[in-house]
Amino acid sequence: MQEETTGMRKVTPAQAASLVRDGDTLLIGGSGGGHAVPEALLEALGRRFRETGSPRGLTALHPVGVGDGGNRGLGHLAQRGLLRRNIAGSYVNSPPVGAMALRDEIEAWSLPQGALSQLMREMAAGRAGLLTRTGLHSFVDPRLQGGRQSPSAKEDLVELVEFRGEEWLFYKPYHIDVAFLRGTTADEDGNVSMEQEAVTLEMLSEAQATRRCGGIVVVQVKRMARRGTLHPKMVKIPGILVDCVVVVPDQEQTYLTPYSPAYAGELRVPLGDIPVLPLDARKVVARRGALELFPRAVCNLGSGIFTGLANVAAEEGCLDAVCLTNEQGNIGGAPASGGDAGAAMNPDMQVDQPYQFDFYDGGGLDLAFLSFAEFDAEGNVNVSRFGSKLIGPGGFINISQHARRVVFGGTLTAGGKPKAVPRVEQVTFSGAYAARRGQPVLYVTEAAVFRLGGAGPELAEIAPGLTVEEVAARMGFRPALAPDLREMDPRLFRDARMGLAADITAKPPRPASARLAAL
């Protein structure tokens, strides 16, 4: 290992992997399909175990899912004996690890992405843990499953507590031995910038939390710079927190995109460069969601079917009439879809993920557009586990519980099977809890739109040409009928543009405070 005068070492991926010992807790930075994922470090650690059988019994901790939906990212660690437990916001990006959890080969928990992200900051400060309402009445609540996703996961990582007469969830902190993080450029003092990344996440908090535990911080970067040449406002991880740097010159921005300057905020692409979606069921759902937009609305687009809403808004020329965000920290622009979800084209700002979730938890979202895997007769929604798939909640729980209005989207059936079921397999969103709090909720499909009523979803809109009986035949329960049941807008099903910009302009904007209105 080469030691610089500051104590920071420039090492190889194999040397970095050698720092991990049996029984360690490994904190992994990054998001989704390769966003700031320290791929070379994870690959080296997986190779070390295959060749030597060491290290064994690791705990992997990562606020966001990391992987390509195959064997990259966390998939490198999907080896029996290497992992003992995994604590994550999502497993959708690492199916091999999810499969190990389903076979009970590891202890597995999936906790809200926002809670884990904010917990990194609490750990960095040495506070007791995270106290939040996020997760109440979902499967994360200890009264249900406590976030457990495998039979061997026995420990209570989340506690239900009463504070000042109200129910809260307390997320316990963790001891970190090694952190694998990623940036773009490191200088000779170990200061790390992230100028080519599409997200910054909680890299700073993760480095601080690891240092407080006396752990080792390893950062993968693309290139080195002379000390003193990085602009101080560009540095996301200061060198005082960095022990080792690994240089990977061919580091790609994501698993699908070598480098997009529009993701990095280097330039803005014309709206015409944002792809127009083909007319199919998914576009119909995205279009119907877009009808809920109003001027200056602040929205979240979760991963899945509603990422297409950004494409619809760009096609209709009204992307700038609203503010679209995603939980990874992008504000404005067009959140990306598919394997690059988490990025955004033409963002106005990129903030660290814990601050984005602070804004969400504080009720900052006017509208949340989220996918559903299934919903039930009580209005509950499941996105986290169904059949043989372990997905995890990601940011879904933070977003859905705290937004002023929630729009869930999906097709009414999948493979001929109803996605509207008598009872969801896992409660990621509680319909009853939302109803008690008076939160407006829609369930949008290509065949019908449902509205959450006092006793569950009510059929509020029906696609042209369909009858109530035909819709009910595609469901696992019979919905109540809304008193104002009407036909879905026929424009949703035509290939031509809808004229959405005029619809949005005709609506009143998000109201200003009374004090500002008086100016």
Image (tube, rainbow, N blue to C red):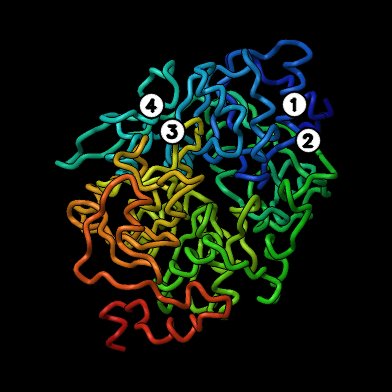
The label nearer to you, 4 versus 1, is 4
Identify which residue, 112 or 125, lies in the foreground.
112
Asked whether the beta carbons under mark 4 and mark 1 sit within 8 Å of each other, the answer is no
Upstream in sequence: badge 4 or badge 1:
1
- Residue named by callout 2: 246
Q: Position of residue 310 (x, y in %)?
A: 55, 67
Residue that label 1 marks: 16
Label 2's element? strand
| Image-based side of 188 in relation to 240, left or right | right
Give the residue displayed 48% in from the left and 43% down from the top.
Answer: 394
Of the numbered discs 3 and 1, the one sitting upstream in the chain is: 1
Q: Residue 62 sits in which quadrant?
A: top right
- On-image quarter of the C terminus: bottom left
| Nearest to the observer: residue 456 or residue 296 | 456
Question: Hey, what amino acid is under mark 2?
Answer: Val
Q: Quadrant of residue 362?
A: bottom left
| Contact? badges 2 and 1 (CB < 8 Å) | yes
Circle 3 — which element? loop
Q: Are marks 3 and 1 in contact (CB under 8 Å)?
A: no
Which residue is identified by label 4? 157
SS class of the residue under badge 4? Answer: loop
Q: Is residue 112 above or below residue 3?
A: below
Left or right position of 153 against 240: left
Residue at image coords 41%, 62% = 447
